[in-house]
Amino acid sequence: MGTLRLFRSRIWLLRLAMDTRGQDMIEYALMAATVAIAAGAILPPVTPAVSTIFSKIVGAFARTPG
């Protein structure tokens, strides 16, 4: 029984290694992770400028008669 189980496990692993159906999803996930890491590295210096712009917009809306 043990030899048959080992043989089936080996066949299953070989089929799994040859299967390429999920390859695109893995590539897209790696690409998304790369973009997220790059954005995280780039955005911290930009945060004060974005905050200033939003503060000006909120101030402009606060001054308009409503």
Image (spheres, rainbow, N blue to C red):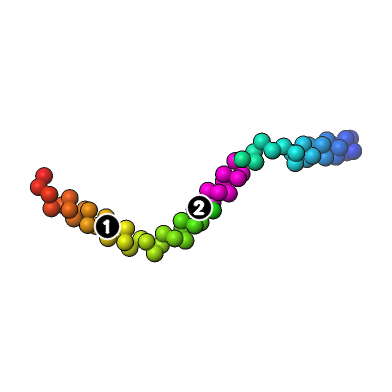
* Residue under numbered circle 2: 35
- For mark 1, does the 10 Å Cα neighbourhood hold few (<14), some (14 to 19), or many (20 or more) residues? few
The magenta segment:
25-33
Is residue 3 covered in magenta? no
* Residue under numbered circle 1: 53
- For mark 2, does the 10 Å Cα neighbourhood hold few (<14), some (14 to 19), or many (20 or more) residues? few
Disc 2 is placed on an element classified as helix
Mark 2 or mark 1, which is nearer the start of the sequence?
Answer: 2
Q: What is the spatial separation of the Cα atoms under label 1 and label 2, in whole angstroms?
A: 24 Å
Residue 5 spot, x, y in % from top left: 84, 37
Q: Quadrant of the C terminus?
A: top left
**Residue type beneath disc 2:** Val
Q: Nearer the viewer, residue 27 or 17?
A: 27
Residue 24 spot, x, y in % from top left: 61, 40
Using residue 41 as the reference point, say whether residue 4 is left or right of it.
Answer: right
Disc 1 is placed on an element classified as helix
